Amino acid sequence: MIHIHQVLATLGYGDAIGHEVLGIQRVLRGRGYESEIFVESADYRLESLTRDYRELVDFSHPDHLLLHHFSLGSKASRTAYALPDRMALIYHNITPPEYFIGVHRTLARQCFRGRRELRAYADRCDLALGDSEFNRQDLEQLGFERTAVLLVVPDFSHLERQPNRLVADQFDDAWTNVMFVGRVIANKKIEDVIRCFHAYHTTFNARSRLLIVGTHGGFERYVAALNQLIASLGLHHVHLVGHVTDEELVAYYEIADLFLCASEHEGFCVPIVEAFYMQVPVLAFAATAVPATMDGAGVLFDEKDPMHVAALMDAVVSNVPMRAAIVEGQLEAVRRLQAKDFAGTLLGFVDDILGSPRAPRPHVTFDFWQQFDAAEELEELRLYRPAIYKALPAER
């Protein structure tokens, strides 16, 4: 009997990838496949649903299929690479390292190496799936020949909980609440959200506040820069809320008047669709996967002049008929998304892979990844410190 297992570095609680992984497992088991989730680590609330990636060796078989969720490169990935099983890659995007230079050197290096390591899987996979068309195109540019889209269909069950009123009641008043949801990380361009809010707050609506909801652990330098910007602008109504529970998140969505996104790099951006579902009008920068995710709904802007964006914010918030039309358009987009047959699409890809000639089995010597890492380090030096090569003696 063919088994179809999933492997990834970590299974997070409440995030988009975690929801997708668990959803895939439900579909596969519903079809009758044996299906386990192998990870290096998992949120303590999900540990009972996973297995240690080192057990993969015991579950491996040439006829089995691994669904490999690639992130920044990991021990789990490298173990899966060397096994004889068929493999399909599921790609959630890796942020270009340039966004993290100066604010998180380690992550910049991980992103650089992750994107290069991803190329090693081009010949290893029977099929590479992006969870958006933008991500599929990224795979194509990285050298993958067989690609397709397994579109994210978010699970909104976590937004059906009762709101935590104790947390959000402090902001449930006559003021306008501008909101952003997402990890406080450099590619999200929170500084641009703050600058646009400042223009709106000082020019159009002094009774407004900005709520930035999302974890910022590990990005202390970036958060410090944001706090310095807030202080330099003299803003007193910007709140970096941090990580929240599902009940708290529901409460924040319920009191929000506008969702503002200035992110420059997104593989999909699930919070935008969450805001659609929660009937919060969305104003977002038209970059990378965001226009496709919005699917003709919400309001896009393609220049970040703060006064221009502030005027759009004012129009959306103050024009009641316009706001109602935007919300209805967003709900239509959610209905179109939910109508997509995620299970049927996934199982169609599985049937196609299992019914096609397989990619060549990997030939991995004992020092394959050590040699790969050494080549990566040399390439990194060539790109970022080319002057060191000029110190070498000229060839004769």
Image (cartoon, grey):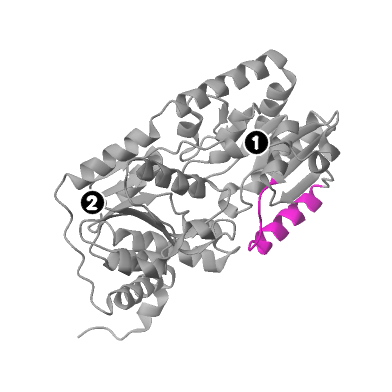
Residue indicated by mark 2: 126
Residue 309 percent coordinates (x, y): 65, 32
Percent from the top left, x then y, of residue 200? 75, 33
Task: Give the residue pinned by disc 1.
Answer: 260
Q: CA distance from mark 1 to mark 2?
A: 39 Å
Q: Residue at coordinates 49% horizontally, 56% vertically from top-left? A: 49
Residue at 30%, 39% (x, y): give it.
347
Give the residue type that dot 2 points to. Asp
Establish if 394 lies above or below 122.
below
Q: Vertical placement of 121 versus 164: above or below?
A: below
- Relative placement, left or right, of 224 versus 175 is left
Q: Is residue 387 magenta?
A: no
Q: Please state the horizontal and vertical placement of residue 11, each as a whole percent of the image.
A: 50, 56
Nearer to the camera, 232 or 299: 299
- Residue type at mark 1 is Leu
- Residue 211 placement (x, y as % from top left): 74, 42
Q: Residues within 10 Å of mark 2 (few under 14, many from 20)?
A: many
Instruction: Considering the whole magenta stretch, tell me its main secondary structure.
Output: helix
Q: Which quarter of the image is occupied by the C terminus?
A: bottom left
Residue 229 among magenta residues: yes
- Depth check, front residue: 256 or 287: 256
